[in-house]
Image: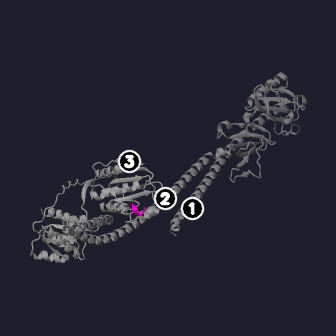
Amino acid sequence: MNKARIQAPDRIAWLLALALAIVVAAIAAAALWRLRATAMAGQARELTLLSLALTDEVDRGLQGVQEGLQAMRSELQEGRLPLAPADTTRALQTRAALMPLVRTIWLADAAGHIVAASDSTPAPAMSLFVPRLDGLADTALAVGNPFDDAQRHEELVAVAVRLAGMPTAGGSWILAAMPARELLGAFSVASPAADARMAVIRADGVRLAGTIAAEVEVDPARLARRLANRAGIEVRLFRDGSRRLVAVHDLPRFGLKVVLTRRLDAVLLAWRQTAQLTAAGLALLLGVVAIAIHLVRRAGQSRDKAHRALQLQLSRASKLEALGTLAGGVAHDFNNVLAAIVGFGEMAQDKAAPGSDQERHLAKVQQAALRGKSLVERILAFSRGGARASTVFELEPIVQEVLALLAASLPPVVVLERALEAHGARLRGDPTQVFEAVMNLCTNAMQAMPAGGRLSVRLTRAAFRAPRVLSHSRLEAGNYLTLAVQDDGVGMGTDVMEHLFEPFFTTRGAQSGTGLGLAVVHGVIAESGGAIDVQSTPQQGACFTLYFPESREPVAPSATRQHPASRGGGEALLFVDDEEALVTLAMEMLTGLGYRPTGCTDPEQALRILREGKERYAALLTDEVMPGMTGTQLARQVRAGHPDLPVLLVSGYGGAQLAARATEAGVTRLLAKPLRRADLARALEELLR
């Protein structure tokens, strides 16, 4: 269902993009088609006007030749043109010079024999004129086939008129030859483009001048089509395979056609370039839209992936927090039991005879109680509820100390690589707990490589300008010390990753630990305000990365060397704890240390005792977790009336950031349960002296 909801917007986005593409393509196609029609219409007008002008020029030129020949006929009929051979040649040369298009003039008899000529150019064949010479009307002009002038190396076209009523000796036809190129007139100058072609064609299809083949007909079934425009331009397929715009105008009185053409691809070149640019722009636009949709889709997928990762991380964090609360509560109650065992055990040992079985048995009890105390401390480290002091210290020396200890017990098949690049970097927290966290990670990495491999430990500084979601926590923006421990071991699957930091969870046998190592790591990181990220693939190793907030505070001074505490001098002490057995234990222990204790199980009772002022107390000793009022709340109220009274907070579980709350409430010293007599004596000596 979720997948369908996620895919539905994607389908809608792509459908919208497709619809947009179709609309844009349709608009572009319509615009291009209109542009094509405009280009064709404009070219048709231009070609029509040019064709009309050239046709008129050919018509006027031929008309001039016809009128010149008819004038010669009149001269011959009237006897004004000499017929003697020498005189006739000169007269014909003079007449040819007066007609601009004419090169040579001949006089032919009825049999077609040349009787006079203006020069030595061979006459054309008399049988190739249209209309035929034997049926030519007196007012008509016959046009012959083109023929070559070998002397001048050019093509000539001959025309003829009839000499009506002339004697045979004087000839029956007047012939005139003109260069074929002269029929094209001003085309070479007025040509609209290099691809333009012109031809003058006789009615029977013989090309007289120009470069266009006479056969300009098209296949009417497939390729011919007539454009609907006023110029009457046609698109025709020529035998060379080219498609051309063709303008044809007739000269009916001479039986000729003037044909003007342009290649269709040249006419539409600018339009085709525009169409290509439009298609490229359209493709680019659609590509940009597709890329944008793809990027939006990927961003959505990344957002969904990040959301799922955040939900998973929140689920893990909530589960670990719930487990921590449960574990802390159990550890608190168990701590009270251990406090009684340790305290009364120590006092029993004092009464036992040296070397007796009783002393030996009590020593075993104390060892077992201290092991339980260590276990409780690890559980409290996971739950972030231990009573720990917070100091500023350098991280790199602690990592170096861990690696030095590891190097001594490192198997030969494991190679240790280190890169410590955060010299002088400091953080605030409990150095002992940090040492244990780093040791746990390195030990786990070694145990994950039974066949050997590479153990890499890297310490660097890192700055993050935006929050990041990690595998098991959220990293806020800020400056961090990054400790990465990577191995080439067996790796982990998602099922193991899900329970990785839960207390007592382990993938090893019962003889390989309690399953609290990574739980302690998680608690230490959470207590310091940092984050943890785990990346692992089965059979490809794992990498644990710890992010500690970097501190700018100066390093705390080193603790003075411990020495045996001196006994009290009868100072009055007020002790508060909701466990009656622990109050009894504290009374006996403090009395044995030389103090005068007063015990109570209710914080309100302790406040009343202090307000009454019957006894001047040297210090207040209080538990943290008590019904009705916590130890830090009690310390805050005591400070209001007795600002100089030292307060020693004794706690086995106080919740997250207990040290910060204790300092804010005015607690002078923090001490962890279960209490050992030596620790209590030393704390009181520091508190009072």
Q: Which residues are magenta?
A: 508-512
Image coordinates for residue 558, horizontal then vertical, percent: 20, 54
Image coordinates for residue 654, horizontal then vertical, percent: 27, 68
Residue 497 located left or right of residue 604 = right
Which marked residue is nearer to the observer: mark 1 or mark 2? 2
Per the image, the residue denoted by label 3 is 417
Q: Nearer the viewer, residue 452 or 640?
A: 452
Residue 107 located left or right of residue 47 = right
Q: Nearer the viewer, residue 84 or 2?
A: 2
Per the image, the residue denoted by label 1 is 19
Q: Nearer the viewer, residue 304 or 314?
A: 314
- Mark sitting on residue 298: 2
Image coordinates for residue 283, horizontal then vertical, percent: 56, 53
Q: Amino acid at mark 2?
A: Arg
Identify the element where label 2 is drawn.
Answer: helix
Say if residue 636 shows up in the picture: no
Say if residue 471 shows up in the picture: yes
In terms of sequence position, does the residue under pointer 1 or pointer 2 come before the other?
A: 1
